[in-house]
Image (tube, helix red, strand yellow):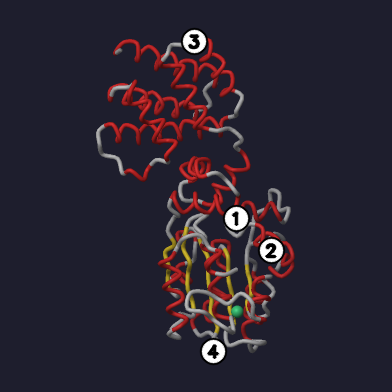
Amino acid sequence: MQFKGVIGQQDIKDYLLNSAQSNQVSHAQMFLGSEGSGNLALAIAFAQYLQCRNKGVEDACGICRSCIKANKLMHPDIHFSYPTVGSKAKSTDFLTEWRTAVAEQPYMNVYQWLQHIKAENKQGNITREECEAIIRKLSLRAYESTYKVLIMWMPEYLGKEGNRLLKLIEEPPDNTVFLFVAENSNLILNTILSRTQQLRIYRLSDAEIAEALVAQHNLTENKARQVAILAEGNYNKALELLSNSENDNQQLLISWIGACLSNQSVILLQWVEEIAKLGRENQKNFIKYALYFLRQSFLLQVGQMKTTALSNQELQLAKQLMEKMTLEHFESVIQLLDEASYHVERNANPKILFLHLSIQVMEHYKDVR
Ligand SMILES: [Zn+2]
């Protein structure tokens, strides 16, 4: 994987490129970032860059012998370590599965990985045997490059076995680089944490996620934005939303508001039937999208919205709503949706919930009309 395949994160890319170009690569780094931030993808791209024989200023060449092996996760001097199942298991026991999983989805979370290796209900682990294997591997000379790199994904799963690695991290053989890739520093041994340089990987912006969805999954800009808003900076979540949600939240919102404002109870009843069938996750997502959209429209109404916050299509819809709704309407619908979101989390009956919500919105609109 090259840096160009990693979404956003330009600051971190620049920092890593600069450290390699000035020969100041820290030998133990902790890529700390929440799920879907791309921390694993960054570490893999950095390892490939370090090994590349024809480095460019901004990226690995992608075509040298080193890059070709690194791209397939088969470079002999880039080692991987990750949670596995089985009390004496080593990462290499699952190497084939690892290569497929990362090639398919480098933004995966540990749960998805454990499902991929059919862990079922078993806990993932980085075992004592794995730690000993790492020590053996890294004490050998590099096969065909300057650096020996170990990428350890989710050191949270090391437990106290991690103490076996301390000496190696503290006094590594020449040109050995540890890249730890973690989500939660509270679950990592302090003894390890304190021996690494920490790189904070931030969540992606909505715009970065939307752009990646358009480029990688052929989504329209409008649909990509709807997904991005719900993904909360987590590209893995965006991909999950994509595979689970066939419904178009924007269309749902347009028909709902339209029916409420024009007092069309038959259409509203059909709408309630439709949303009740969607399942709880989709209902939560609809409410979240509706809240986002109405808050942005409200800000537009009071003249405080950044123009970039809505797509052209959304902007048109917002303007239509503003012709019909006062600030007070916006506020009350937002408040009612907030309450509905609370109840949907607590497993309220969806038909009753959405019917009640719609009647309240309708009545409130009638009152102040
Ligand atoms: Zn190369």
Corner quadrant of residue 331: top left
Residue underneath mark 2? 98
Q: Give the foreground label among 2 and 4.
A: 2
- Looking at the picture, tell me which residue is in the foreground, 343 or 222: 222
Secondary structure at numbered mark 4 = loop
CA distance for labels 1 and 4: 32 Å
**Could you say which is closer to the camera, residue 172 or residue 352?**
352
> Earlier along the polypeptide chain: callout 2 or callout 3?
2
Mark 2 lies on a secondary structure that is helix
Separation (CA) of disc 2 from disc 4:
27 Å
Residue at the disc numbered 4 = 174
- Mark 3 residue type: Ser
At 25% from the left edge and 36% from the top edge, which residue is drawn?
A: 303
Q: Which residue is mark 3?
A: 265
Which residue is depicted at the point 67% across and 54% down?
A: 114
Residue 354 shown left or right of residue 86 in the figure: left
Residue 70: x and y in percent read: 64, 74
Q: Which residue is mark 1?
A: 108
Crowdedness near tag 2: few (<14), some (14–19) or many (≥20) residues, C-alpha within 10 Å: many
The quarter of the picture where residue 330 lies is top left
Disc 4 C-beta below 8 A from ligand 1: no
Total marks placed: 4
Ligand 1 placement by image quarter: bottom right
Would you place residue 264 above or below residue 240 in this image? Answer: above
Label 3 CA crowd tier, 10 Å (few <14, some 14–19, many 20+): some
Q: Kindly identify the amino acid type of the residue bearing the numbered disc 4.
A: Asp
Q: Which residue does the image show at 56% across and 51% down from the upper left?
A: 236
Going from the N terminus, do you reach mark 2 or mark 4 first? 2
Q: Position of residue 59 (x, y in %)?
A: 52, 74
Mark 2 residue type = Trp
On the picture, is 219 further left or further right than 288?
right
Q: Classify mark 4: residues with Cα within 10 Å, few (<14), some (14-19) or many (20+).
A: some
